[in-house]
Image (spheres, helix red, strand yellow):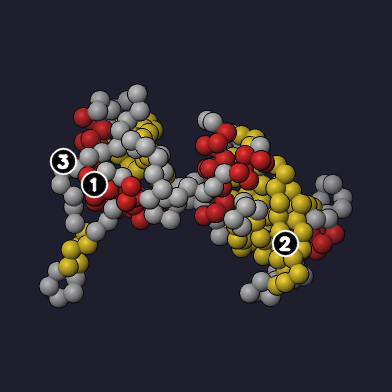
Amino acid sequence: MAEVELAVLARTAVDCSRLGSLTTYDRHPSSQHTATIPLRARPDGSVELQVTCGSVSAGQLLARPIATLHVAPAGYEAVLLRGSARRLPRTSTQAGLVFHLEAAIIRVGARSALLDERAYRGAAPDPLRHDAPVVLSHLNDTHADALAACLRARGQDAAFARATRLDARGLTIVTVGSTGVATVRLDFPAAVASLNELPAGMACLLTPTTTPHPGGRSSRQVPPASAAAPHEPA
């Protein structure tokens, strides 16, 4: 995977995280403590950590301002950030301490691929990250059978299909067939900054819509079966 793509995955995962696993260290090298904490990503990719006053994490950060943060939001790559954690001169809404973590070491994914910090800081989160959860739910709840049929028409062994990731470049789908489980990547014709930039048929397929019913109820409107699908890479 190209470093630029890896950097986008990392920035997206961090930006979508609201909780993380924070490891702090005592002055003795073998002593460390891990806790789940709230966090907020900054626009530059650094992270604000919210730590409870009087906690072991707070005490260790004040004594030795080094930390390791693990985040793994649903649907995104796991990311490890390790670096210095400087206390900010204000408290969080929970009356805790706020530390600013600037990562010097970044690792991404199940294989812990090492990412250059300059590439990480120079990247931006994926523009479809806020749309992705709703779109994936829509596809899997409403169009799972059509998605599997589309893949079979393209030669894939897909008795069952589930969309697992949406980003600016395309859609990732996990399939189950007679030969086992496979991951299929369907690329968009070009990278997009919003769903509105997709061709009309493709945008219709990916965008949940509602049709009003008498009595105030509504139901999802299913796009026609001829709606265009993303292109599978050669």
**Which residue is label 3 attached to?**
226
Which amino acid type corresponds to the residue marked 3 in the rendered image? Answer: Ser
Mark 2 is surrounded, within 10 Å at the Cα level, by few (under 14), some (14 to 19) or many (20 or more) other residues, namely many
Q: Residue at x 18, y 50 (%)?
A: 223
The residues bearing labels 2 and 1 have C-alpha atoms spaced at a distance of 45 Å
Residue 22 appears in the picture as rendered: yes
Quadrant of the snapshot with the C terminus: top left
Mark 3 or 1, closer to the camera:
1
The residue identified by callout 2 is 99
Q: Secondary structure at mark 2?
A: strand
Query: Against 117, is 60 above or below?
Result: below
Who's the residue at 76% across and 69% down the image? 89
Q: Are discs 2 and 1 less than 8 Å apart at CB?
A: no
Q: Report the front residue among 194 and 153.
A: 194
Image coordinates of residue 17 in percent, x first then y, are: 55, 56
- Mark 1 residue crowding within 10 angstroms, few (<14) / some (14–19) / many (20+): few
